[in-house]
Image: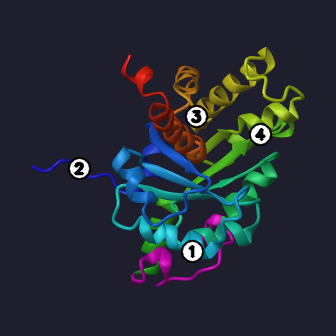
Amino acid sequence: MSEHRFTGDELAPLIRQGGSSQGAMVFECFTPGISSILANAGAQFVIHDMEHTGLGFESLKWLFASARGLPIAPMVRVPRNQYSYIARALDLGARGVMVPMVESAAQAFDMVQASRYPPHGRRGAAFGFAQCDYQTGDLEQLMAGYHKRTLLIAQIETERGLEALDAIAAIDGIDVLWLGHFDLSNFMGIAGQFDHPAFDEAFRRVAEVASRHGKTAGFMASSAAWIARAQEAGYRMIAAGTDTGILQAGFAHLIDVMQNPQEAKA
């Protein structure tokens, strides 16, 4: 019997059932091969960033298409909490949407409404296009299936989001509380001080509140030390990043070997 092959549609159910998942965040390498590269590396998901990168919907549609048939869930961080961003990303085939700077229960509720069809939300219907792999079927079954496979990620990255953490986590439909460490430290007045006791308390609190509400805590880790810290605190959805930093470090290592061959042999 062949081993089960993970599919992108399985990510959301896995997370909701208390499972762990590893993936990547992409900020620059928006190429047709990135989904295959990451899947081959063992990533179960990829989050393409629209907030800071200039990535547009036409390119995003192309990136999602490149993930079809691969054991990876293509997702996106939209620029802001707007219906036109969230619903359009889902129409293009996103298996999950991350929304930055969520600061209240009302904002979390708006995320859910934009991603769910009636009677569970206010999302407009468009079937037979990209999210459906250009196929049609029973509409009730299609909508139920899209609700099941869609992961909603609320980023906690401001002092206001931290204050409203319990209220945000209590919103039905929010699956992941994702700590944005750089912004959070900035808004806490301790920019980049990730060893500061106040930041460490906030870091642990996000994971604790997520667990208490039956949700998952998420984080982007840029080093083995960050991965260990996040896992120890209870984060179960971790993305490797940034792609720019990883790529530069890899090239820098080999170029250093070229420039200092004797040291490399030692």
Judging by the rendered image, the residue that carries numbered circle 4 is: 157
Give the prevailing secondary structure in the magenta stretch: loop
> Along the polypeptide, which appears first: circle 3 or circle 4?
4
- Lower sequence index among marks 1 and 3: 1
Q: Which residue is mark 3?
A: 221
- Give the SS element for disc 4: loop
Q: CA distance from mark 1 to mark 3?
A: 29 Å
Q: Position of residue 251 (x, y in %)?
A: 50, 42
Q: Between tags 3 and 2, which lies in front?
A: 3
* Dot 2 crowding, Cα within 10 Å, few <14, some 14–19, many 20+: few
Residue 133 position (above or below residue 263): below
Which residue has dot 1 on it? 91
State the residue position of label 2: 4
* Cα distance between the residues tagged 4 and 1: 27 Å
In this rendering, position of residue 214 left or right of residue 82 = left
Q: In the rendered structure, which disc, 3 or 2, sits on the residue that comes first in sequence?
A: 2
How far across and how far down the image is residue 38, in percent? Answer: 42, 51
Q: Earlier in the sequence, mark 4 or mark 1?
A: 1
Query: Does the magenta run of residues contain 119?
Result: yes
Q: Is residue 240 visible?
A: no
Query: Can residue 171 be seen?
Result: yes
Q: Which residues are magenta?
A: 115-137
**In this view, 219 is above or below 110:** above
**Residue type marked 4:** Glu
Element under label 2? Answer: loop
Mark 3, other Cα within 10 Å: few <14 / some 14–19 / many ≥20: many
Q: Rounded to the nearest whole Å, what is the CA distance between mark 2 and mark 1?
A: 28 Å
Q: Which callout, 2 or 4, points at the residue further toward the start of the chain?
A: 2
Q: Count how many numbered circles sit on residues in the image.
A: 4
Residue at disc 3, secondary structure: strand
